[in-house]
Image (cartoon, helix red, strand yellow):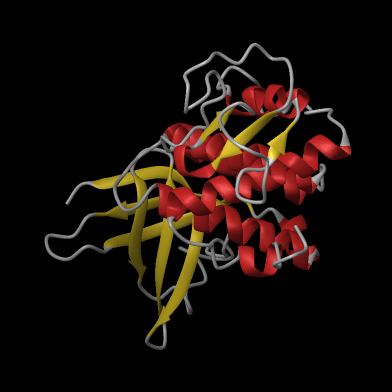
Amino acid sequence: MEQKKTEAIILRTKDLGESDLIVTFFSSIYGNLKGVAKGALRSSKRFVNSLSTFSLVDVEFRERSSGDLVLLESCELLDGFPGIRSDYNLLLRASYMVEMTEILFPSNVPSSEMFQLLRWALGSISNQQNADESMISFQARAMKIGGFGINLSTCSRCGRQYKGEGRALFHPPSGSIVCLGCEKESIVTPGIEPDTIHALHRLQSSERPLSNRLECSDNVVRELKAVLTSHIEHCLGKRLKSAKYLYPVGCQ
């Protein structure tokens, strides 16, 4: 089979026998793939220091005539994002990002935009550039790329256009804002300020450079965290495993 080469991020690895590894990686061209790295646990050349989780690599592989696993030929480390491994909370954030990527983009569903987002987010938290803001940016943009963007333009109940003024509510079942005339504020439908809606609009926009600071108040950050956590869990139908440690119940 033809040999292929692509940039990729190592999502997870698993030992296979005494010397081989099962490697799951998200590539810029081919999406989420899983392959066998034969002899990886003993190799001193083809895979040296390049198969650690969260690493950015150049990987060469071949598709096999049978089975779902590709065969990894070689792997070169581009960036190990070492800062992630220096802090347990950063490890949790990186694990959350990887888990979201795997759910939103299962095997063989390519997205160069998602790859660039994950690459940026891992680099950002590795460099310790405001981990909370990086996480919020990742969550909002990833859901948008995956087809689950939050509707911020109209009330999902009455269809009235939101003009950027006044408090609104977030309605998880519809993935949309609703007006105060259609719903009452509650734990299920939390209230959000205009500044939060404006910030979320910027976060979801593909035209906003990821490197741009969000520059918003602590209250806006709190509301964004609550809205995005609720939205993600409703759309995905479950709470992410890593979220149980990153966002303990009652501590969000």
Instruction: Please state the horizontal and vertical placement of residue 34, each as a whole percent of the image.
Output: 34, 61
Q: How many numbered marks does the figure carry?
A: 0
Q: Residue at position x 87%, y 33% from top? A: 217
Q: Position of residue 53 (x, y in %)?
A: 57, 63
Looking at this view, is 52 or 101 the one in front? 101
Residue at 71% x, 39% y: name it: 224
Q: Nearer the viewer, residue 241 or 169?
A: 169
**Residue ID at (12%, 64%):** 66
How far from the left and from the top, in percent, is residue 195? 77, 24
The answer to which of 57 and 250 lies nearer the viewer is 250
Q: Compared with residue 217, is residue 21 higher up or lower down, i.e. above or below?
A: below
Does residue 104 appear left or right of residue 124 in this picture? Answer: left
Of all residues, the one furthest to the right in this rendering is: 217
Q: Nearer the viewer, residue 193 or 236?
A: 193
Q: Is residue 162 visible?
A: yes
Name the residue at the left extreme: 65
Q: How far across and how far down the image is residue 216, in percent?
A: 84, 29
Is 169 above or below relative to 66? above
In this rendering, the answer to whether 150 lies above or below 241 is above
Q: Tell me: 64 left or right of 239.
A: left
Q: Going by the image, does 42 lie left or right of 86?
A: left
State the quadrant of the C terminus. bottom right
- Residue depicted at 79% across the width and 28% down the height: 213
In the image, residue 90 sits, relative to residue 153, either above or below, namely: below
Quadrant of residue 140 within the rendered picture: top right
Q: Can residue 78 be spotted in the picture?
A: no
